[in-house]
């Protein structure tokens, strides 16, 4: 293609070129003195104060000198608990950590037999005082027999059976068997009777109570065995029978509804009367 040859432009391209040339001519004709209107300035913004301190200053008024001079009452700190040494807890193997208010309960499986016997005897004596003898806790069965046991009732039942068998001249073993069965079965039946009447008492707690109430009859049986006198037997049995009934009355009556009190007390009195007849009849 030679230099003299020209290529025709597209109509749209030609119109664009013409428009550009017109704009250039207009800018030249207007001259360099023409200045476009400046953009109006933006409104002034409020300045944020900047402080070199890391904490902002408070607008609150300063505290009064008297308030700042007040002293703060210190809270008392409880004294530290005393350290429990091993020597005081395990002297002779009889004391354990459970003797204090902290630690696990005492392990009674490893203690000496004599310590176990002394603890059971002290419990029997304590419960006997609470049930049989006058004391301020007799009207509240929960406090009187809170630490109930069955060793005491078992001992009093066996002791009464042995006393009656020693008093008998013949068939001593049969007398012991009858007395033991009467007392053991009677205590279970009387406890079930109280529970069926809607009584609020623990089964074994009731057995423990009825067994401890046999203590006066045990004393009467010993006296009757030593003094073989019918009139003396009648007097002793009457007194001990009233004593046993008086001991069982507050506990059994408070365990049931007041309207069913007689239904709970009558069988108890009947069992003690039967034991009294055994004491009188056996020679």
Image: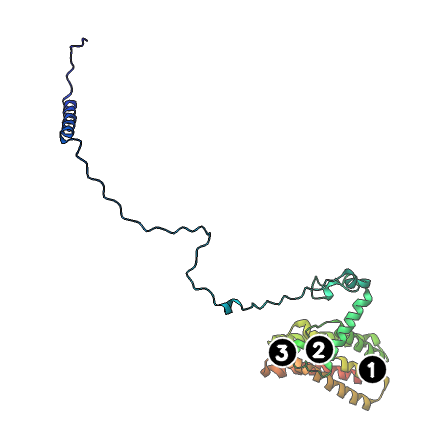
State which tag comes first along the sequence, 3 or 1. 1
Q: Taking 184 as reference, is 17 left or right? A: left
- Please tell me the numbered disc located at residue 29: none
Q: CA distance from mark 2 to mark 3?
A: 13 Å
Location of residue 225 by image quarter: bottom right
Q: CA distance from mark 3 to mark 1?
A: 32 Å
Q: Is 88 placed above or below 176 here?
A: above
Q: Taking 20 as reference, is 51 left or right? A: right
Location of residue 268 by image quarter: bottom right
The image shows residue 253 at horizontal and vertical percentages of 64, 81
Is residue 182 among the parts visible in the rendering?
Answer: no
Local SS, label 1: helix
Q: Nearer the viewer, mark 3 or mark 1?
A: 3
- Please tell me the numbered disc located at residue 222: 1
Quadrant for the C terminus, please: bottom right
Q: CA distance from mark 1 to mark 2?
A: 19 Å
Judging depth in this view, the residue of 249 and 60 nearest the camera is 60
| Residue at the image position 83 percent from the left and 74 percent from the top | 173
* Residue that badge 3 annotates: 255
State which tag comes first along the sequence, 1 or 2. 2
* Residue that badge 2 annotates: 210
């Amino acid at each position: 293609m030679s230099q003299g040859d020209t290529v025709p432009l597209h109509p749209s391209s030609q119109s664009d070129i013409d428009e550009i040339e017109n704009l250039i001519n207009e800018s030249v004709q207007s001259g360099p003195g023409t200045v476009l209107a400046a953009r109006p300035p933006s409104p002034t913004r409020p300045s944020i104060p900047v402080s070199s301190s890391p904490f902002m200053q408070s607008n609150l008024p300063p505290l009064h000198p008297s308030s700042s001079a007040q002293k703060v009452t210190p809270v008392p700190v409880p004294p530290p608990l005393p350290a429990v040494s091993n020597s005081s807890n395990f002297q002779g193997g009889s004391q354990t950590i459970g003797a204090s208010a902290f630690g696990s309960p005492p392990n009674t499986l490893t203690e000496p037999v004599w310590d176990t016997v002394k603890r059971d005897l002290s419990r029997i004596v304590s419960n006997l005082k609470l049930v049989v003898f006058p004391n301020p806790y007799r009207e509240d069965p929960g406090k009187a027999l809170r630490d109930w046991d069955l060793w005491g009732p078992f001992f009093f039942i066996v002791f009464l059976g042995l006393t009656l068998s020693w008093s008998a001249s013949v068939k001593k073993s049969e007398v012991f068997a009858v007395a033991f069965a009467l007392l053991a079965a009677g205590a279970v039946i009387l406890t079930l009777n109280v529970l069926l009447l809607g009584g609020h008492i623990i089964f074994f707690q009731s057995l423990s109570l009825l067994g401890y109430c046999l203590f006066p009859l045990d004393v009467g049986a010993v006296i009757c065995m030593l003094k073989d006198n019918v009139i003396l037997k009648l007097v002793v049995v009457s007194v001990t029978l009233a004593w046993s009934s008086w001991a069982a009355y507050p506990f059994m009556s408070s365990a049931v509804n007041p309207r069913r009190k007689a239904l709970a007390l009558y069988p108890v009195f009947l069992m003690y009367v039967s034991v009294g007849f055994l004491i009188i009849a056996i020679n």
